[in-house]
Image (tube, rainbow, N blue to C red):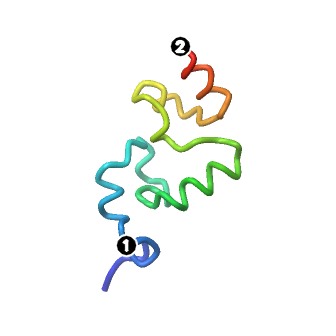
Amino acid sequence: MPSAKLDRCPRAKTNAAVCTCTYTSCPRHGLCCECLHYHRGRNELPACYFSEADERTYNRSVEFFIQRFKK
């Protein structure tokens, strides 16, 4: 029987293998569409938009992304 995660997203296993988010216990880890909707609703971007060092700050704000991107 497939896990609930795989029922929600047929690519969850593949996505989880390449997901750059270090918060692996997140219920949306590997579920890209759910992750995008979650962060968009909070005026944030998901981890995959950030460099490895910036991702580890857990600051997902659009403002932080713009600040870091301008460098």
Residue 30 vs residue 42: left or right? left
Disc 1 marks which residue? 10
Disc 2 marks which residue? 71
Q: In this view, does 10 lie above or below 64?
A: below
Identified at 44% across, 53% down, the residue is: 25
Displayed quadrant of residue 64:
top right
Residue 31 vs residue 63: left or right? left
Q: What element carries label 2?
A: loop
Within 10 Å of the Cα at label 2, are there few (<14), some (14-19), or many (20+) other Cα atoms?
few
Within 10 Å of the Cα at label 1, are there few (<14), some (14-19), or many (20+) other Cα atoms?
few
Residue 50 vs residue 2: left or right? right
Identified at 29% across, 53% down, the residue is: 17
Q: Of the residues shown, which amino acid type is indicated by label 1?
A: Pro
Q: Of the residues shown, which amino acid type is indicated by label 2?
A: Lys
* Image location of residue 49, percent across then percent down: 49, 37
Identified at 58% across, 41% down, the residue is: 45
Displayed quadrant of residue 69:
top right
